[in-house]
Image (tube, coloured by chain):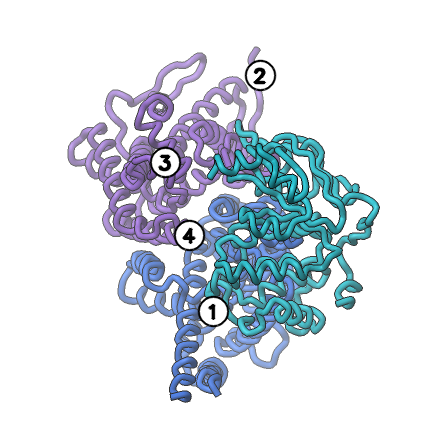
């Protein structure tokens, strides 16, 4: 049964179609948020610090991807270049600066904050202040028919990629030896070191992986959301909301939180655009009131 | 006798400050007067954040949100509804305080990293309102044309020098109020929460309450700064209250020395002056600010004020040793 | 000292009577995920008693203290304090009722002076702690009480030193003085002699002997000499469970206890 509704902004539309489109939109945004927040979670899990420069990685990844794409015309190259360069930047940041304050959370976070400002300005310097939209890969342009609606292929692609990454991360965490070593390090640094695990190497690698995921997400999101100075902190805040809602240090929490925040943000933009950032306040308040550590939080 | 050296330095310092801030301003150009006015307003803001960071040990990353909410209230009431100074000023602080009372409920149970995360998110929620609620806040364009208040004084407040002295009075009042506050029994309890919240609970303190009050009081004072700023600048935009703005205030506190009140005010002065000078030559202010941050953490994590205090104590001991020898 | 008693306390420890047990633990348990740290402990401590809690590392002694003082919520069982069920009360409410504790790992306000530490304890249970617009130093009764405590614990000379700059022995002194500042009715001492030299331990033992006899004291002590010196009655725990209870002689001659200690060491 089709329900016709009159929406103040969209005029007359069919409810089921509206819901489907917005849900898919929300899921595609949630997919990007997952790439961003899973990286944040990984870093937090191993080092117990919140990387304020994490949104900056997302932004830098998009910018670098853009430059590489414009030169090589290859989306895949751009995506991996963006991811790898930022991963290296992240690991340099960790090794050169953060490691000096190992186990001291606050100074480390302050340093990441300083770097966030540095990255923002470097981006301004290199790419200027105008917003860009990344070119969409040829094969993924256009739209396709799903049930009764027409929906961009690329957005579906993003959801697909994020799902793949989620499965890969889960397998890595649960099923591999490296994943077990990681979990051991996360649970207890001293014990892990005592058992012979190279804690600094693992921390470094996890930081690199987290940075890669964020930057990769940035490139993925580029064709739809574009890149501009300011993206770094806007998305960082959203990633934080995901952490608050989903729980810290939990992959499941990242996934569920990203989906929720993506959906709420998107429906918010569609229904009450003037209050759209504010609509995130409600889920935060509810989760904090009911389960302060987040839906799947472990502490 | 040992204390005399430190006291002499303190007295000289106070006299210098008195000269620079009270006696000399009529001789400065309006550029310097404006800069000093900015410093005093941000000084109040930095001191208010010091209550949270320096005294209670809670890193709040959304404090600019309170600055902005108060400034926007003043802006909207004065430009759209043509309300007078007293109503606007009090409303600004009231709105900020109410917001902080609601946010405080979410935040007071948190500590450490989690406190950081949630205050950051809440600060950006407020920014989002300013940015997107275009009907009320004019969004990205901000609200301009906030008139200088008419307090019925013989000299108009449009004169930078007059407004400066008014702000100086507000600054001194806030400084005195906050100084008493942090030396009070309640202020003492905040230091305890900073040092060991677990011990405080065992001793009998309902630490949630103390953190809540600390958060709300910091927001209220931040609101004072915001109201004063709206009238000073005549203009407010979302950029005054985004994450970068919050980060700038944190750096003022850290650079100046958390837990000293005067230190953050000093830090505010340094950052404001630096920002103005550097921006005259290059666009790269954020790069420099970020680098200052990193350098401060590496080389002076306790901040300038604490460095000065330690230096004074060191001189005290030297004088004492000299006297013995 | 009576002056502090008449100041408005947030909660009154009017429940204190000599006719009922000071502390009763009924089938008290604590689980951490899959680990049962404390398993159905039953314990009764009479008022004015000096009881020692013993057991090898991991026996659950500190966990028990954390349960009694409200740091951990109990997974099962009840805690009765002068017949009042305090099982659900948060720590700060229990402090107001007169329960105080010290920590095995020193937990002081490191960046504050000794005076400031003691003042923090002195003002903890009175309404003055909420005053925001009057200087703390103007409250004569508080500062007097603080000074008395400083002198009593031989800390007067060091009163303006930052705690983090003091020796371990001094810090252990401050630990005990903080707990006693609020005139508790039940005092939980968690290995007060931890890390002390034999001279310092001797001073501590003298201090413990001089404590107000009306206070009920529960002491965790690893050092058998200090334990036997102090205790009238001892309770031995092992792996979270109750093992044995009795006088010095009974415990000394208890073969299971000897086995556990010799085996553990």
Q: Residue at x 40, y 70 (%)?
A: B307
| Label 2 residue SS | loop
The residue positioned farthest toward the top in the image shown:
A1
Rendered blue, the chain in question is B
Using the numbered discs, state the Cα–Cα distance from disc 1 to disc 3 in whole angstroms. 42 Å
Q: Chain of mark 2?
A: A
Secondary structure type for disc 4? helix
Q: Secondary structure at mark 3?
A: helix
Label 2 with label 3: CB-CB less than 8 Å? no
Residue A3, numbered circle: 2
- The answer to the question of whether label 2 and label 4 lie on touching residues, with beta carbons closer than 8 A, is no
Q: Quadrant of the C terminus of chain B?
A: bottom left
Mark 2 surroundings: few (<14), some (14-19) or many (≥20) residues within 10 A: few
Residue A106's mark?
4
Q: Nearer the viewer, mark 2 or mark 4?
A: 4
Chain A's colour is purple
For the residue pair A174 and A72, the one nearer the viewer reads as A174
- Give the Cα distance between marks 2 and 3: 53 Å
Q: Which mark is residue B265?
A: 1
Q: For the point 68% across and 69% down, which residue is it?
A: C145
Residue displayed at 40% across by 18% down: A150
Label 4 and label 3: CA atoms lie apart by: 20 Å
- Chain ID, mark 1: B
Residue designated by label 3: A185
């Amino acid at each position: 049964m089709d329900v016709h509704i009159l929406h103040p902004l969209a005029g007359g539309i069919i409810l089921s179609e509206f819901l489907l489109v917005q849900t898919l939109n929300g899921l595609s945004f949630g997919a990007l948020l997952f790439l961003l927040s899973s990286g944040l979670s990984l870093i937090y899990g191993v080092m117990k610090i919140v990387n304020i420069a994490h949104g900056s990685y997302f932004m830098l990844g998009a910018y670098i991807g853009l430059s590489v794409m414009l030169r090589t015309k290859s989306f895949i190259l751009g995506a991996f270049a963006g991811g790898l360069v930022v991963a290296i930047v992240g690991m340099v940041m960790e090794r050169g600066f953060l490691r000096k304050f190992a186990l001291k959370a606050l100074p480390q976070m302050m340093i990441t904050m300083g770097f966030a400002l540095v990255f923002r300005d470097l981006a301004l310097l290199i790419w200027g202040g105008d917003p860009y939209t990344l070119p969409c890969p040829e094969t993924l342009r256009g739209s396709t028919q799903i049930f009764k609606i027409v929906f961009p292929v690329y957005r579906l692609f993003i959801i697909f990629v994020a799902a793949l990454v989620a499965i890969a991360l889960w397998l890595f965490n649960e099923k591999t030896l490296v994943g077990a070593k990681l979990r051991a390090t996360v649970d207890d640094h001293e014990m892990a070191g005592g058992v012979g695990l190279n804690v600094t190497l693992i921390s470094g690698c996890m930081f690199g992986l987290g940075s890669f995921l964020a930057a990769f997400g940035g490139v993925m999101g580029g064709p739809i959301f574009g890149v501009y100075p300011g993206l770094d902190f806007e998305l960082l805040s959203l990633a934080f909301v995901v952490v608050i809602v989903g729980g810290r240090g939990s992959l499941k929490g990242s996934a569920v939180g990203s989906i929720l925040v993506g959906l709420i943000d998107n429906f918010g933009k569609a229904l009450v655009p003037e209050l759209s950032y504010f609509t995130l306040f409600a889920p935060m308040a509810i989760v904090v009131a009911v389960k302060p550590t987040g839906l799947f939080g472990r502490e | 006798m040992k204390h005399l050296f430190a006291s002499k330095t303190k007295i000289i310092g106070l006299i210098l400050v008195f000269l620079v801030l009270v006696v000399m301003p009529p001789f400065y150009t309006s550029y310097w007067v404006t800069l000093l006015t900015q410093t005093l307003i941000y000084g109040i803001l930095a001191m208010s954040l010091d209550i949270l960071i320096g005294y209670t040990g809670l890193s709040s990353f959304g404090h600019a949100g309170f600055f902005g909410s108060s400034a926007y209230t003043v802006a909207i009431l004065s430009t759209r509804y043509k309300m007078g100074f007293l109503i606007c000023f009090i409303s600004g602080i009231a709105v900020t305080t109410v917001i902080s009372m609601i946010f405080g409920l979410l935040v007071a149970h948190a500590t450490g990293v989690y406190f950081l995360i949630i205050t950051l998110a809440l600060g950006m929620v407020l920014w989002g309102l300013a940015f997107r609620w275009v009907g009320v806040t004019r969004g990205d364009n901000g609200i301009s044309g906030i008139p200088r208040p008419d307090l019925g004084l013989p000299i108009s407040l449009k004169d930078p020098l007059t407004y400066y002295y008014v702000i100086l009075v507000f600054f001194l009042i806030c400084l005195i109020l906050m100084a008493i506050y942090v030396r009070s029994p309640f202020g003492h309890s905040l230091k305890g929460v900073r040092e060991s919240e677990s011990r405080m609970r065992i001793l009998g303190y309902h630490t949630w309450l103390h953190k809540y009050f600390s958060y709300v009081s910091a927001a209220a004072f931040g609101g004072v700064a915001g109201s004063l700023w709206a009238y000073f600048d005549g203009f407010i935009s979302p950029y005054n209250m985004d994450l970068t703005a919050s980060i700038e205030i944190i750096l003022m506190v850290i650079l100046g020395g958390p837990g000293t009140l005067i230190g953050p005010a000093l830090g505010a002065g340094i950052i404001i002056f630096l920002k103005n000078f550097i921006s005259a030559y290059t666009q790269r202010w954020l790069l420099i600010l970020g680098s200052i941050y990193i350098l401060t953490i590496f080389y002076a994590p306790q901040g300038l004020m604490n460095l000065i205090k330690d230096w004074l104590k060191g001189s005290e001991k030297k004088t004492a040793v000299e006297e013995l020898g | 000292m009576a002056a502090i008693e008449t100041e408005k306390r947030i909660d009154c420890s009017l429940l204190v009577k000599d006719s009922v047990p000071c502390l009763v633990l009924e089938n008290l348990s604590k689980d951490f995920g899959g680990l049962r740290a404390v398993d159905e402990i039953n314990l009764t401590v009479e008022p004015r008693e000096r009881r020692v809690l013993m057991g090898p590392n991991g026996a659950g002694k500190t966990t028990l203290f954390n349960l009694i003082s409200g740091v951990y919520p109990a997974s099962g069982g009840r805690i009765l304090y002068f017949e009042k069920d305090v099982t659900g009360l948060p720590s700060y409410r229990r402090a107001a009722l007169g329960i105080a504790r010290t920590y095995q790992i020193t937990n002081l306000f490191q960046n504050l002076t000794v005076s400031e530490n003691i003042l923090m304890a002195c003002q903890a249970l009175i309404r003055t702690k909420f005053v925001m617009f009057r200087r703390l130093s103007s409250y004569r009764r508080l500062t007097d009480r603080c000074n008395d405590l400083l002198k009593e614990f031989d800390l007067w000379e060091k009163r303006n030193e930052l705690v983090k700059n003091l020796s371990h022995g001094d810090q252990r002194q401050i630990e005990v003085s903080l707990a006693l500042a609020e005139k508790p009715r039940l005092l939980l001492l968690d290995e007060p002699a931890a890390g002390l030299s034999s001279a310092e331990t001797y001073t501590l033992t003298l201090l413990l002997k001089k404590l107000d006899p009306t206070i009920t004291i529960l002491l965790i002590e690893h050092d058998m000499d200090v334990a036997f010196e102090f205790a009238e009655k001892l309770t031995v725990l092992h792996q979270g469970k109750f093992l044995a209870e009795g006088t010095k002689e009974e415990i000394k001659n208890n073969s299971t206890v000897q086995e556990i200690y010799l085996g553990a060491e």
